[in-house]
Image (tube, rainbow, N blue to C red):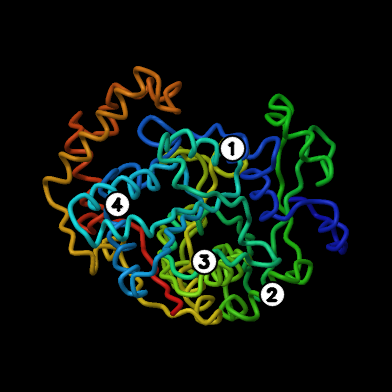
């Protein structure tokens, strides 16, 4: 660690905070992980998500939640499903296909189909392009908004009634790293990049990191500064995190995203009446105060062991969500906390049963996707072809059915996992 003595404001002005460095590694236009569009979703890719791993079943569950919310709102003539950060578009595709299919079986669902409008709020233009390619002919039923709802500014009112879905959105917020040494006030980490003996100030960082050869030569050092150098973070700690100031011995670092309360509040204002599903891995405040850093921030593919400084711009970086903060922020924004618990709570009130037949349908969909990759129409075909042979190490025995069954058991809470769903409502 470098020692800058008594010049915290000078360091804060010259170098990025831990939070700003992570945000750039994810979203910098020229080198950020999401901005470059090089993400590989699903089996054989950088990471998987339940909307992909359990396709089309996950989409059927969300479609049923949307139908229930539409009925709760009085069956309006216009109803939105609004997805924040839609990944490769798989969930959108599965929801629309489900609604069309069920519309052919039920008059109520047919009316719902006519009312439905799918909205995607996406910060990354590269991912929006991927989503359009994934949706094919259904693209005409979708509208995109490129907006960062975690930032300040006017929030667009997008409609009257909606179901809002945010799957693994909160974990992508860049977090500040707060050190908690015994006997002293909490401190916020800043990052000082160095190449050789020269430090790289924030104004030069994009230029260096955009060159992959230079990027590999950079080394990173953390400097702890007083919270006051980041006023928004100091305010967040004062309003929501009094526990950080009561430590009597060294405690693990805590990761905080000042944007989280703003994001939840802004999403709550998108519609006059809405149910919001925040689906993510995380835990309550007690876990975040005691768990070591390695269990709260992750970089790279699962089990890769990467840290955030190993391959910035090439690795995803995610954080365990503090759901206590999320719930407190929701209440402060005037939203009602309807439910919090395991991801299987998504099934509540849908009338759906997820049983052995779900495994067969998931396997059938995977087979179709892989055949499309072979012949070329799949927009991710260039890399999916490399994953057509099942990875026996990942399947732990070579059975694709067993692997899907494990994913389904994890979703249903039969296997230990850290995914949670927070259901909020504005009425």
Dot 2 alpha-carbon crowd within 10 angstroms: few under 14, some 14 to 19, many 20 or more: some
Mark 4–mark 2 distance (CA, rounded to whole Å): 54 Å
Q: Nearer the viewer, mark 4 or mark 1?
A: 4
Kindly identify which residue carries mark 4.
99
Give the x, y percent position of residue 368: 27, 29
Q: Is residue 332 above or below residue 271?
A: below
Give the percent coordinates (x, y) of residue 301.
45, 38
Q: Are marks 3 and 4 in contact (CB under 8 Å)?
A: no
The quadrant holding residue 136 is: top left
Q: Nearer the viewer, residue 341 or 302?
A: 341
Answer yes or no: do the residues labelled 1 and 3 have beta carbons within 8 Å? no
Horizontal relation, residue 206 to residue 345: left or right: right
**Residue 297 visible in the shown view:** no
The kind of secondary structure element at disc 4 is helix
Q: Which residue is the site of mark 1?
A: 126
Which one is nearer the viewer's eye here, 189 or 400?
A: 400
Q: Is residue 389 left or right of residue 194?
A: left
Task: List the single residue furthest toward the top.
Answer: 375
**Residue 366 image position (x, y, % from top left):** 27, 33
The numbered mark, 2 or 1, whose residue comes first in the sequence reads: 1
User: According to the image, label 2 marks what residue?
Assistant: 185
Q: Quadrant of the C terminus?
A: bottom left
Q: CA distance from mark 3 to mark 4?
A: 20 Å
Q: Is residue 176 visible?
A: yes
| Picture residue at 49% right of the left edge, 52% below the top | 294
Find out whether the residues at labels 2 and 1 contact each other: C-beta distance under 8 Å: no
Which residue reaches farthest left? 356
């Amino acid at each position: 660690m470098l020692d800058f003595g008594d010049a915290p404001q000078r360091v804060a002005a010259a170098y990025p905070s831990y939070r700003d460095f992570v945000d750039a590694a994810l979203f910098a236009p020229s080198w950020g992980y999401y901005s470059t569009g090089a993400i590989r979703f699903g089996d054989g890719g950088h990471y998987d998500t339940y909307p992909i791993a359990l396709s089309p079943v996950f989409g059927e569950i969300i479609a049923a939640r949307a139908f229930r919310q539409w009925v709760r709102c009085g069956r309006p003539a216009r109803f939105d499903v609004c997805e924040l950060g839609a990944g490769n578009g798989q969930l959108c595709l599965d929801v629309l296909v489900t609604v069309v299919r069920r519309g052919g079986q039920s008059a109520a669902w047919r009316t719902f189909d006519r009312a439905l409008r799918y909205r995607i709020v996406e910060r990354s233009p590269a991912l929006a392009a991927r989503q359009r390619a994934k949706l094919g002919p259904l693209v005409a039923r979708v509208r995109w908004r490129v907006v960062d709802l975690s930032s300040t500014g006017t929030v667009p009112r997008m409609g009257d009634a909606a179901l809002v879905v945010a799957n693994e959105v909160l974990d992508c917020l860049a977090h500040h790293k707060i050190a908690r040494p015994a006997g002293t006030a909490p401190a916020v980490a800043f990052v000082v990049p160095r190449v050789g003996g020269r430090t790289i100030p924030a104004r030069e960082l994009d230029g260096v990191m955009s060159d992959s050869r230079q990027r590999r030569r950079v080394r990173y050092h953390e400097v702890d500064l007083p919270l006051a150098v980041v006023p928004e973070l100091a305010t967040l700690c004062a309003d929501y995190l009094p526990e950080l100031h009561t430590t009597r011995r060294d405690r693990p670092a805590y990761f905080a995203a000042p944007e989280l309360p703003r994001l939840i509040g802004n999403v709550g204002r998108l519609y006059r009446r809405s149910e919001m599903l925040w689906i993510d891995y995380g835990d309550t405040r007690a876990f975040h105060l005691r768990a070591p850093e390695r269990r709260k921030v992750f970089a790279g593919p699962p089990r890769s062991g990467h840290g955030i400084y190993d391959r910035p711009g090439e690795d995803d970086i995610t954080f365990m969500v503090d759901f206590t903060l999320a719930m407190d922020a929701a209440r402060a924004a005037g939203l009602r906390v309807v439910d919090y618990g395991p991801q299987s709570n998504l099934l509540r009130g849908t009338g759906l049963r997820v049983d052995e037949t779900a495994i067969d349908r998931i396997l059938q969909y995977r087979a179709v996707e892989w055949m499309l990759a072979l012949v070329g129409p799949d927009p991710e075909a260039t890399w999916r072809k490399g994953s057509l042979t099942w990875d026996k190490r990942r399947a732990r025995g070579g059975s694709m059915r067993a692997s899907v069954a494990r994913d389904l058991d994890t979703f249903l809470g039969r296997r230990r996992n850290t995914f949670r769903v927070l259901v909020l409502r504005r009425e």
